[in-house]
Structure formats: C-alpha cells, structure tokens
C-alpha cells in the first residue's frame, strides 16, 4: 500500500454487518481477490506478504467504531460517502478498513478499492484515509424499455427487464447490471420508456417489477418508473386525469401506496408530458407544476421524487414563421414556474435545447431555475451519435456542458454546481443518463461501454477529466499496457470531434433523417416540417438566426454575459456559429476560412480521422485480447466507410446548394469511381436515391423482380494492383449476395447481411466492401453480379479504385 510498492490488500475480507449491501460488497471484493492480491506469493516482497496476512473489514462507521475503537473513523461522512483507511506498516497487524456512513457508502468504497490496482497500482492511500463523496444525490440511468421487450433508441438488442408484457423470468442480467451501475456510483434506474408508460402500472405488473427491485437492491440501485399522466383515466377508469381533480390526486396516492407496499425503497416517477404526443396537464389548462406537484404529493410521504422532464415542446411549429423556435420551448415553459414546484420535484433537462445532437449549446434553463431542483439528462445510448455503430466517446461533450459557466447574476455558476444543488442551495439534483442497455453486451459495442462508465464517474465527480476517465476505463477493462492505454484513450478522445466533423459541424447539429432513422445523412429532413430542428440552409447561406436583434430571441434566454457572447457572430465560438446565426457561405470564421470551405474540410478531416482509427487499432494487435481485437476491427472499418458516405453526402449537398466549389477540388469530384449507372447493366435498373446526396451523383442501380442482375465496368486505368471499394446498399431486410469477377476470374463474394436502418437504399444503409490486392490491366472488365433477397434488391452505387 505504500507509495512505490505495488498495491496489495489483506485477503481475509469480512463485513461487520449483515445487510445485503455489505454482503454484496464482500462478494465483490472476494470475487476480485485473485487479480488484486497477486497470485504468486513466492514473487512478493516481505511487505506485500505481510499486507496480505492482515484483514480487510467493511462496514458502516458505527459498526467500525464498535469493533475497532482505535480506528480514527471520521464522524462527518455523508450518506453515500466512503472512507478507506490502512493502519500502515508500523502496526503489528495489517488492517484495511472500508467504511461508509451507510452500507451503500461502504459498497462504493469497495468498488473504489477495486479500481486502484489497475488505475493507481503504486499509489499509497493517504495516512488520514481516502474519502470519496458523490457530487450530487441523483445519479440515475433511464432505460426506455417497452413492455414487449423492445427498447426505444436501444441499439443492443432486447430488454434485460421485460418481454412479451411481463418481467423476464431470468433476472441474472438485471443483477449484473446493478453491479455494473454500483461500480460507478449510480444509485437509481428508471426502468421503462417515458412514452406509453401506463401499462406498467397494473397491479400484476407492479408485483412483477418488485422482483426487479429485489434484484437491484443489494447494489444500492433504487428502481423508479416512468409515469403516464393520463393513467388515472387509462387505468383507473376515471373520467379525467386533470391533476387538480381530487379524485385524480386520490388515484395517485393509492397507486403510490400500492407501489411502496411492494417496493419499499422505490425511487419515484419520471414524467414526459405534453411532448411528442404524450398526454399532459395542458389538456386541462394546467401547468407542468400542477402535474408534478400532484405526483410529488403522493410520493413525498414515502420518500419518493418526481423527475419532471423539461422536454416539452410543440412539434407542429410553423416553419415559415421566422420567430418560431423549438429551442426556446423548455425555458419559455419552465422558467415562469420557477419556485412553484414541491421540494421533491426535480426538473430533468436535456443538456442542450434540442435533442442530443452532435453539438448544441447548453440549455439556458439551467441558469433559469434558481428556486427549483434540477437534473441534467444525457444520452449514453447514441441515438444521434452513430447508434453504437460509430465509435463516439461522449464524455468530452458532457464535460464541456458540466463546466459551462452560466454566469447567473454575473457570478461563476458552472452547470455542474447548479445540478449538484450547490449553487442555489437545493436539496436535490443530479445527472440522468439515458442508457437503453440491452442483452447484447449492454451497449452493443465494446468501446461504447466507455460512455456508461464515464457517465457514472462524472455524476460522482464532474471535476474528473474525460481523458483520465478514458484511461481508467481502458486500464480496467482492456489492458494496463501503456501503448494500449495511450492508443485507446487517443481514439476515444478523437472520436466525438471526428463524428461532429463528418456529420454536422459549426453547430449545424446532426444532419440526419430526423423524422426517421436518426442515423444516416439527410440534410433536408430537418427542414419544412414542424419538428423545429431547422438549419435553414438556402442558396445564399446557412444557419438559424436566434439573436435577440433580428432572430427568434432565443439567445435572450441566457444570462446577460452569455447572451452577449452569442448575440454577435464574431464572439460566438465557431463550433456553434450556425446554431445561433444565419450567415452567407462566404462568411469568414475566426481563422479566416470561409464557412463553405470549413464544411468541406471538416468532412474530409472527420472521415480521414475515422479511417485512422483502423490503423490505431491494428497497431495494438497482439497486445489485445484476440476476441476483442477481432470484434472491434470490423466495426471500425464499417465506421470509416460510413464516414465516407456522410462526407460525400454533406459536401455534395452544400456544393450543389451554394454553387461554391471546394478550393481543394474534392467535393463532388470522384475521379477514381466507376458509377454503377454508367456500367453495362443486365437486368439492373437505374434509380434515383432519396435523398439524392446519399449516393454518388444521386443515382444507383437496383435489382427488382429478377433472380439476379449484373453491372459490368470497363477498366481504362493504368496497369497495377489496387484495392477495390464496392459501395452498395445493405437494406434492413434480406441478405442480398454479391459476386465480383475480373475478366471472368472470380475475385470475391459476400453477403449484404447486416441489419442497417431503412427499407430503401439511402445513407442509412450505404455500405462499403473492400477487396484487397486486385491486379488490373487496362481493358479488363470488372463484373459485379447482385442476387437480391427478401426485399433487399442488391442495390449498387459505385466501385472505387483505390491506390493500394
Ligand atoms: C423517448 C427524442 C427521441 C425519442 C424520445 C424523445 C424523448 O425525440 O427520438 O425517441 O422518446 O427524444 O426524449 O422523450
């Protein structure tokens, strides 16, 4: 335990108390002893052996004081704090103490101890003991699981909680998830989707949900549920769900009593109301405060809370009205209600004013509720960030938001202090991460788990640095080898900037299909509809004027110093320019580059960076678990290829719209491509891809109603060996087959068997197959046969001849 010596702790581990949380903590320590204590005693130093021979005890401060009166237990630990203390080697018997004011604190202490061998193997514990304290009381994940076992915005398979209208019989994964959450300090899990929640509130279902609570309780994770405001009517048979109707209040009181009889430590309710079709108090002319307070009154006697979401907006906005602005909604609705919420209500606000885009400014509401508890909602599931098919480590974005200074009353007021409750002296506050974990490795992709880890660590301590968190995570889950840690941390840290660059830079948000998949490129999907995710690109310029002077006035919702910065395009940071201002394409950014050239450059840079991830990962081959290496490699290859789809779509689009060429000659100019629509086609038909920018030159070929089709290209380039990139569309359904031959020689065959979004060829499913080391001579014919399957028409965009 001393500095300079490797970390050991006594392997005789016991709990002083009997409660389930202490037992879980002890089980956790025992489970990891092998890796912690060092297995080969013959190679240990005398001190290490001595250390191993003492004892490790875990308990509440009260229990420690009783059993070890000489141990200097602090008397001011908060309810979830831990204290780890070592009696150091001058004592006769080695004693390691893990204490908490409650057993939950001790559990967090055990996990902190377990982190150290990988993350700080040579760091001694301080003489006075190591203390840890969560920055904020509410640290929850939200799951958007439906009762049938599907998960809204879940990208890792089916629910671990529900199936076919019931709680799953096998709850082992739920216990495992609770362990995972506890290991990063998360203390609550809201189980069900915020949409369509009423079905979860039947007596039968609540009894089943109690089993989930039982499975999570030993890890200090309290369960909560999303509540449908209309439940008194939908389930209770009342004629109304008016929150101010006494019969409605009574219905909620009774329902809450029923829940607590089954789940005594139930956390509370999360509410989505008057939003995206969910019913709400507006139906009765009541406010969110009326609705929240009705639920709060029912929950208060039991210690439960209401997380009322500020994600309330009209999705039928008039796009022709220059003053209409969805970004304004949360502040316009909730700021006037400040001070009107019960003490057990927390307003849960998404980190930005729109909806988890590649970049948004911080929601002004954080600075606009000084007499109300607040929590920040983040998305761990990567809805608009590549849906876990793209590597995007989101912690750097979250950190920017947490550190952002709202300048309330001209004072330093970083968001992290507001949501911790410190700034405005609130009892409650916190961070909510929408996780949407599923049965497929929790988040579907191994490196995506860094986001769940980072969420928990930041909710515990928002002062941590994203790169340090990334390093901790890598050391614990992949390897402590320095090259691995450096490379993986670099990849993680560069992944959000890369994604932002190839999807929606300068504050354009994610330029995706916002009414459909939220995945591939679709620039116009945001426009000319009521959803309000507008970027207002036209022939002359791009960006949304949200200024007070000439725009929607959204900027006026910020505190004066922040508003002043955003009101002027010259003081707005480039990365948010187009969120706040409409400018001509020739507008010059701070470094003198024009907006249009930046759009071109950033997309090429982002795609190049994504390609580099492959080389980075390959540089670690041999140092990684082979299963992890080969699981991740095709994902990175896919991402690099999809980044090219994004790059080409956005750059082609803005080239056409602005009419201003790329100074570097790349956009819309693909000299090494053989376009499918120009090939000699047998049975293939030329189609217009929708949106046009998702295919090279807007066109592709598709094989419909034929057993097979082919495209033959005449190679006129130089003699040499090349890599061939075949760009095709791998639709959600079916598994079309492709066969490539050169001058009659079969070169490769593959199957389009991925399940990418969308049932027609577009940027959601445009995919690249690489064929390496192909020898070509001028005059060769490159022949591609496509065999459609079950709704997948083997659609083809182009073949690109790459320098090998
Ligand atoms: C649960 C976005 C998502 C919806 C989600 C909603 C919300 O609009 O696309 O799937 O619904 O946010 O946060 O309520």
Image (tube, rainbow, N blue to C red):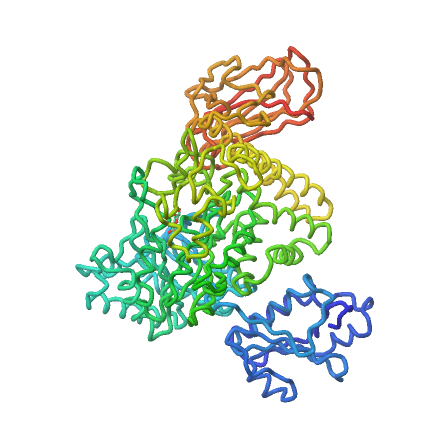
Q: Please identify the quadrant where the C terminus is shown.
A: top right
Nearest the eye: 407 or 210: 407
Furthest toward the left, the residue is 239
**Left or right, residue 151 beside residue 745:** left
205 or 584, which is in the foreground? 584
User: Percent position (x, y) of residue 689?
Assistant: 43, 25
Task: Determine the residue positioned at 43% across, 36% down.
Answer: 542
Q: Depth check: 42 or 365 in front?
A: 365
Can you see residue 180? no
Question: Number of callouts in the render?
Answer: 0
Q: Where is residue 190 drawn, in percent x and y?
A: 42, 60
Query: Residue reaching furthest top?
Result: 779
| Residue 16 against residue 582 in the figure, above or below | below
Q: Nearer the viewer, residue 784 or 516?
A: 516
Q: Viewed as shown, does residue 27 lie left or right of 252?
A: right
Residue 412 against residue 600 in the figure, above or below: below
Seen in the image, is 401 located left or right of residue 324?
Answer: right
Whether residue 469 is visible, yes or no, is yes
- In which quarter of the view is residue 472 placed? bottom right
Q: Is residue 488 above or below residue 526?
A: below
Q: Where does the image place residue 311, in percent across and percent down from the top left?
A: 36, 53
Q: Percent position (x, y) of residue 688?
A: 42, 22
Can you say whether 138 is above or below 588 in the image? below
Quadrant, the N terminus: bottom right
């Amino acid at each position: 335990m001393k500095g300079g010596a490797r970390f050991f702790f006594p392997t005789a581990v016991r709990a002083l108390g009997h409660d389930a949380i202490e037992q879980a903590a002890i089980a956790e320590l025992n489970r990891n002893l092998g890796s912690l204590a060092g297995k080969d005693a013959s190679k240990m130093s005398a001190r290490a052996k001595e250390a191993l021979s003492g004892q490790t005890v875990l308990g509440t401060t009260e229990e420690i004081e009783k059993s070890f009166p000489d141990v200097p237990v602090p008397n001011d630990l908060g309810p979830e704090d831990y204290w780890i203390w070592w009696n150091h080697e001058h004592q006769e018997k080695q004693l390691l103490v893990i204490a908490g004011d409650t057993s939950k604190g001790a559990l967090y202490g055990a996990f902190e101890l377990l982190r150290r061998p990988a993350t700080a193997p040579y760091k001694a514990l301080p003489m006075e003991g190591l203390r840890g304290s969560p920055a904020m009381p509410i640290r929850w994940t939200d799951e958007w699981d439906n009762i049938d076992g599907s998960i809204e915005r879940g990208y890792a398979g089916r629910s671990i909680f529900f199936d076919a209208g019931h709680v799953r019989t096998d709850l082992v994964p739920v216990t495992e998830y609770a362990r995972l959450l506890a290991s990063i300090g998360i203390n609550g899990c809201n189980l069900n989707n915020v949409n369509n929640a009423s079905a979860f509130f039947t007596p039968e279902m609540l009894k089943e949900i109690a089993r989930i609570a039982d499975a999570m309780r030993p890890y200090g994770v309290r369960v909560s549920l999303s509540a449908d405001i209309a439940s008194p009517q939908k389930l209770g048979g009342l004629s109304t769900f008016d929150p101010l109707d006494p019969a409605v209040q009574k219905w909620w009181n009774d329902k809450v009593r029923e829940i607590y009889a089954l789940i005594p430590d139930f956390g509370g309710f999360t509410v989505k109301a008057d939003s995206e079709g969910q019913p709400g108090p507006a139906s009765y002319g009541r406010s969110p405060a009326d609705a929240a307070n009705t639920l709060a009154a029912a929950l208060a006697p039991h210690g439960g809370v209401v997380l009322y979401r500020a994600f309330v907006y009209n999705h039928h906005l008039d796009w022709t009205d220059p003053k209409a602005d969805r970004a304004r909604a949360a502040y316009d609705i909730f700021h006037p209600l400040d001070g009107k919420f019960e003490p057990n209500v927390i307003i849960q606000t998404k980190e930005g004013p729109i909806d988890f885009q590649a970049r948004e400014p911080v929601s002004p509401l954080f600075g606009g509720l000084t007499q109300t508890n607040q929590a920040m909602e983040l998305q761990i599931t990567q809805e608009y960030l590549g849906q876990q098919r793209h590597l995007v480590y989101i912690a750097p974005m979250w950190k920017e938001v947490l550190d952002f200074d709202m300048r309330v009353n001209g004072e330093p007021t970083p968001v992290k202090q507001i949501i911790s409750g410190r700034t405005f002296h609130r009892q409650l506050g916190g961070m909510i991460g929408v996780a949407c974990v599923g049965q497929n490795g929790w988040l579907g992709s191994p490196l995506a788990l860094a986001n769940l880890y980072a969420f928990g660590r930041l909710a515990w301590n928002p002062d941590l640095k994203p790169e340090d968190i990334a390093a901790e995570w890598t050391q614990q889950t992949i390897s402590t080898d320095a090259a691995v840690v450096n490379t993986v941390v670099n990849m993680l840290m560069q992944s959000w900037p890369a994604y932002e660059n190839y999807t929606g830079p300068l504050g354009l948000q994610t330029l995706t299909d916002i009414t459909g998949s939220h995945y591939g490129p679709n620039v116009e999907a945001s426009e000319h509809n009521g959803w309000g995710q507008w970027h207002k690109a036209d022939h002359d310029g791009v960006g949304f004027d949200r200024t007070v002077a000439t725009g929607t006035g959204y900027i006026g919702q910020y505190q004066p110093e922040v508003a002043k910065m955003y009101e002027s395009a010259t003081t707005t940071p480039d990365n948010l320019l187009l969120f706040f201002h409409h400018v001509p394409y020739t507008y010059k950014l701070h470094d003198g580059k024009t907006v249009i050239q930046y759009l071109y450059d950033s997309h090429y840079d982002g795609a190049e960076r994504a390609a580099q991830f492959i080389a980075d990962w390959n540089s670690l081959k041999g140092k990684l678990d082979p299963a992890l290496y080969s699981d991740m490699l095709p994902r990175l290859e896919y991402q690099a290829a999809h980044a090219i789809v994004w790059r080409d779509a956005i750059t082609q689009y803005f080239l056409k719209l602005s009419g201003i060429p790329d100074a570097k000659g790349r956009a819309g100019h693909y000299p090494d491509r053989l376009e499918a629509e120009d090939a000699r086609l047998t049975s293939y038909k030329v189609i217009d891809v929708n949106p046009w920018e998702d295919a090279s030159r807007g066109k592709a070929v598709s094989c419909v109603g034929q057993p097979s089709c082919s495209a033959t290209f005449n190679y006129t380039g130089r003699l040499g060996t090349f890599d061939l990139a075949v760009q095709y569309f791998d639709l959600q359904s079916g598994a079309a087959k492709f066969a490539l031959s050169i001058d009659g020689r079969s070169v490769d065959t593959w199957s389009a068997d991925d399940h990418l979004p969308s049932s027609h060829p577009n940027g959601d499913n445009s995919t690249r197959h690489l064929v390496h080391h192909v020898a070509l001579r001028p005059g060769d014919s490159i022949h591609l046969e496509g065999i459609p399957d079950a709704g997948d028409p083997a659609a083809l965009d182009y073949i690109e001849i790459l320098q090998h």
